[in-house]
Image: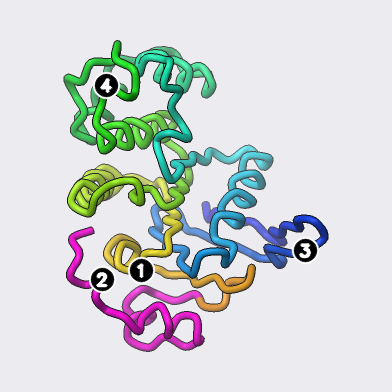
Amino acid sequence: MTITATGLCAIRSGRTILHPTNVDIRPGERVGLVGASGSGKSTLGHALIDRLRAQGQRVAHVPQSPDEALDPLRSMAFHWREAEHALNLSPDPTRRQDLFAALHIEGSDLNKRPWGWSRGMQQRFVIAMALIGTPDLLVMDEPTSALDSVVAAGTMDLLDAYLSDRKTALLLITHDLGLAARRVNRLMVMEDGRIVEDAPTEQFLLAPVTQAAKSLCAHRNWLELPC
């Protein structure tokens, strides 16, 4: 079933930062939401998450930094138990092992605190937690910005492989067109709180229509980066 949300909007201090916006994402679709800083990307992502959860749909969120998801005073095992509890899921070692193996964090010490793991492993753990409940939609907001480009690429490769035969859709929010172009089959551009362009990735890169999209495509140095 297509994931649909209509009339998403946000007003802060009397100022509209997200104009009424409709979003449709097909099962298993990979969508990138790109645009300059302050264009409203994260605001749209949060509005979409809130709406879908209110509608009873399964949606998971991966924040920009693992620091936003992990308590430095709690063990990794504690975080995993809390994630299962929040989703009303019984502990399942097999499910955990499958996710850890898919994200290459199997064998890691769950008794350690987050700072006992590398940043890349922390972010992969956060992604694994987001996938526990087999969400209909995974929203990732600048998920690799806290990682170096090689670790970022490896993390996204593992996620791509895991999702390849599943119906979980992905919304990748980023200002990094290079990251999005390699990972999604459809791109949406935000400018001033509005989606101003929405096109298949190849078409978008070859023939951007709006000035915002043309500006994003103008500098192709991102083609040299691995992520």
In terms of depth relative to the viewer, which is nearer, 93 or 121?
Answer: 121
Q: Are marks 1 and 2 in contact (CB under 8 Å)?
A: yes
Residue assigned mark 4: 116
Residue 151 drawn at (x, y percent): 21, 46
Residue 224 sits inside the magenta stretch: yes
Dot 1, crowdedness within 10 Å: few (<14), some or many (≥20)? many
The numbered mark, 3 or 1, whose residue comes first in the sequence reads 3
The numbered mark, 4 or 1, whose residue comes first in the sequence reads 4
The numbered mark, 1 or 2, whose residue comes first in the sequence reads 1
Q: Secondary structure at mark 4?
A: helix
Q: Secondary structure at mark 2?
A: helix
Q: Nearer the viewer, mark 4 or mark 1?
A: 4
Residue assigned mark 2: 222
Q: Which residues are magenta?
A: 198-227
Q: Nearer the viewer, mark 2 or mark 4?
A: 4
Q: Is residue 10 above or below residue 96?
A: below
Residue at 42 percent of width and 60 percent of height:
174
The numbered mark, 4 or 3, whose residue comes first in the sequence reads 3
